[in-house]
Image (cartoon, rainbow, N blue to C red):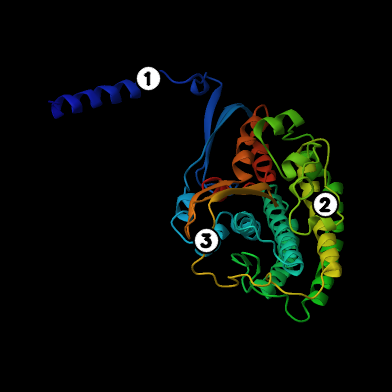
Amino acid sequence: MVNKHDVKKRMRQLAAEYIHEPQREDYVLDDSEMMVHIGPQHPIQPGPFLIDLKVRGETVQKAKLYMGYGHKGMEKLLESLTYLQGIPITDRACYLASLSNNEAYVSSVERLLDIEPPERSQYIRVILQELSRIQSHLLGTGEYATDLGFVTMFLFMIREREYVLSLIEDITGARVTHAFPRFGGVREDLPDGWREKAIDMLHLVNERCDMYRELFSTDRTYRMRTVDIGVLTKEDVIKAGLTGPALRASGIDYDVRKVYPTLTYPDIDFKVQTEKNGDIFDRIMVRIGEIQESCWIIEQALDQMKPGPLFPEELPFGRRTPVMRVPPGEAYVPVEDPRGEIAMYIVSDGTDKPYRVKIRGPAFALMQGLPPMLENVYIADVPAIAASMDSCNSEADR
């Protein structure tokens, strides 16, 4: 029989051994070094995480990342809800990319159901994904600019973002969390007069991006703080599994919309935005280029889409599907969200709820790419490097 007093005594011994355990090599400091803790809450962070910096003078010698402070159990939650109830949950994976999250989830379920949305619904979903990309890049880049003290740029970008959010709100009824796509279609059609309003707004945003590019490119102080700072080589981004703008800034033209196109993306002409140096400056230039490219994609979609139904004929469900049994099987559909590749692996057992849901988001990989970039840089450059990754810790800690 186990004696509880012996167990407690052994636990105290193990605790004492742990407390007096020799420090790991990364944390052994000499007289010229110190440890700087940034987080879990800090102005430069896109959510709670902790990064320990081993610093000698003004130079970072080693960086270690700790995550998991905002874990939500989202995947397990999706397995306890019906398929329709899961759509609003996917909004919360990353509030800046809620429409991309919706699309990854809905398109995976559509593949299990073996249904294809009508062309008009596909174009509407493409338009909303690109509007979501624009507003995400505007906010992410504007907030990044504040970390460098470039507050004027933030004021410009947040103003243009409000215009884009108004376009999204006109369609979905919400600014941030939309739950708009449906299995086999979309919840609503474009409202009357929306096309004309959108064209005017997109032309304005496109022109403003030319101004952003010029301001970023010609400001001497900004270039000193971003050019050749926080460099990620092709080998670095591949090793860390990065996708999205952080990958394309290092010269790799991988974009899910080209490699695994869904919806009507194969019928739309657009260029994958890339740069070659992989530094802070290039990561921002890629995002500005993607804003302009998204404007062009939306204009093409508006020109090409024709009147038609929002759901396939004789579909047994539509806007409201409270009970919907999905045939057994598994599906995985990747989508290019503002930060990179997001996909949802869904396993169905034939009931009205998913048996298994696994989210592959871009943010976790973006966080893994951060510590190597911080080694041998000045500690003053850490905020700029971290913000230039435009990660979303809420999505990483799902």
Q: Is residue 39 above or below residue 304?
A: above
Q: Which residue is denoted by mark 2 in the rendering?
A: 289
Q: Is residue 118 above or below residue 266?
A: below
The image position of residue 386, as x and y in percent, is 65, 41
Q: Quadrant of the N terminus?
A: top left
Q: Is residue 253 left or right of residue 72?
A: right
For image coordinates 80% across by 53% down, the residue present is 290
Q: Is residue 72 left or right of residue 339?
A: left
For image coordinates 74% across by 33% down, the residue present is 231
Question: Label 2 neighbourhood size at 10 Å, few (<14), some (14-19), many (20+)?
Answer: some
Could you say which is closer to the camera, residue 29 or residue 73?
73
Could you say which is closer to the camera, residue 34 or residue 387?
387
Q: Is residue 239 above or below residue 359?
A: above
Residue 155 in sight here: no
The amino acid beneath tag 2 is Gly
Q: Which residue is denoted by mark 1 in the rendering?
A: 21
Dot 3: what SS?
helix
The amino acid beneath tag 1 is Glu
Disc tally is 3
Q: In the picture, residue 102 is in which quadrant?
A: bottom right
Q: Which residue is denoted by mark 3 in the rendering?
A: 83
The image position of residue 285, as x and y in percent, is 81, 47
Dot 1: what SS?
loop
Residue 77 in sight here: yes
Q: In the picture, residue 372 is in which quadrant?
A: top right
Mark 2 or 3, nearer chain start: 3
Mark 1 or 2, nearer chain start: 1
The image position of residue 147, as x and y in percent, is 66, 48
For image coordinates 66% across by 45% down, the residue present is 387
The amino acid beneath tag 3 is Tyr
